[in-house]
Image (cartoon, rainbow, N blue to C red):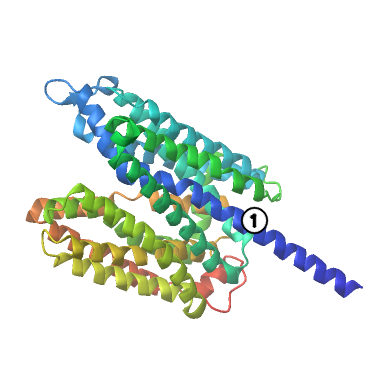
Amino acid sequence: MGIDTVRTDAADEAAGRRREQRGWYFYDWACSVYSTSVLTVFLGPYLTAVAKAAADADGYVHPLGVPVRAGSFFAYAVSLSVVVAVLAMPLVGAAADRTGRKKPLLAAAAYTGAAATAGMFFLDGDRYLLGGLLLVVANAAQSVAMMLYNSYLPQIARPEERDAVSSRGWAFGYAAGSLVLVANLVLYTAHDSFGLSESQAVRVCLASAGLWWGAFALIPLRRLRDRRTPSREGAPPGLRQLATTVREMRRRPLTLYFLLAYLVYNDGIQTVISQASVYGSEELGLDQSTLIVAVLLVQVLAVAGALAMGRLALRYGAKRTILGSLVAWTLTLAAGYFLPAGAPTWFFVLAAGIGLVLGGSQALSRSLFSHLVPPGKEAEYFAAYELSDRGMSWLGPLLFGLTYQLTGSYRDAILSLVAFFVLGFALLARVPVRRAIADAGNPVPERI
């Protein structure tokens, strides 16, 4: 009887864990549409056009009395959103671990971001300040929500499950991004058939991403559950807590060393994502429709890539698979240097290579880091992880820009990014992950 009870309890626990995992996947499904349709495709050009409509004769707008060139307004708004996110994540992460109530905080961040994105429907005429404000709120909220979402991974998946679970989450996100982007492109390219102007079509695309985000966020919020943590009444709040976390992480130097490696190679990944369209348009002379199709191709193939690399990690371990993906990134960029101008087919081949390694390298980095987090400190440590992801994403664009400035060649600029993957490979190869996992107080998986 006792054995049957234990088996029943174990089966119930496994069923509950699978239910939470399925709900967890749907947050990626919900919020990735914002990254794809809003940030990557539509908002930058549209907000820039709105700012130019509000500009003076010299091409400047004046937010809070500060002269800003209209063409730079979007970039500055994105930078400000990163600053807001960097300030907010330690506050929220500390509160989540101190109280054990992640779900209300995730709901607040998700619906703040979704509401701000839906509000972009009202971004017309010369309302550039409204657009900048909504962008800052939505982008910062997304960063905070992703920190909380990522911090659930060690709690809902056993060590041996995390590579596969993390990979499925990324795959869900890329699948949703592809699906909605196709619908948005149909609406945008055939806006006359729907009785909409081009501006109205863009605003509908922007707002629909917010509605999608809010609607599908209900699924993880219903299925995920909070875990009560031991009381930490003496824990300092906010930024003081971040300082405390950093000091503690210094006692786990291997975790910090992994974060350094991740910071380096992920900065390369983020720069490729943000600058590939510039390379395609300026160096290769490709038109906007070609670039949008390439973005869609990346999204679709990233689904297959994330799932395939999750399977490779089961066989070879997450660390080896990530190292292999960094080699693939290096070869892809090297091939990109030789792409002929005016040949969209070869640019699509480059996009395919990026898509196949993009989702997997990000998903496995997340799951590998989850093994290095001490129990009960998930949100705090994932705040540091997100800070490495979001807060240092200026290094790659800076190198890209400086290389172009010095050489006048976007080919040299894209090739310069190889340095991030080579250095990231060297740093990650030196991390003894089994010892790092044991130092964090976690069980070491058979294959990692």
In this view of the protein, which residue sits in the foreground, 415 or 347?
347
From the viewer's side, name the closer residue of 100 and 362.
Answer: 362
Residue 83 shown left or right of residue 75 in the figure: right
Badge 1 density bin: few <14, some 14–19, many ≥20, Cα 10 Å:
many
Q: Residue furthest front?
A: 193
Counting from the top left corner in percent of width and height, residue 319 is at 44, 73
Residue bearing the label numbered 1: 20
With respect to residue 78, does 3 lie above or below? below
Can residue 217 be seen?
A: yes
Q: Quadrant of residue 268?
A: bottom left
When the figure is inspected, residue 366 is found, relative to residue 109, above or below; the finding is below
The secondary structure type at the circle numbered 1 is helix
Residue 335, above or below 180: below
Find residue 187 and report its horizontal and vertical position in percent.
34, 40
- In this rendering, position of residue 6 left or right of residue 90: right
Amino acid type, label 1: Glu
| Residue under the point 23% across and 52% down | 291
For the question of whether residue 380 can be seen, the reply is no
The quarter of the displayed image where residue 411 is located: bottom left
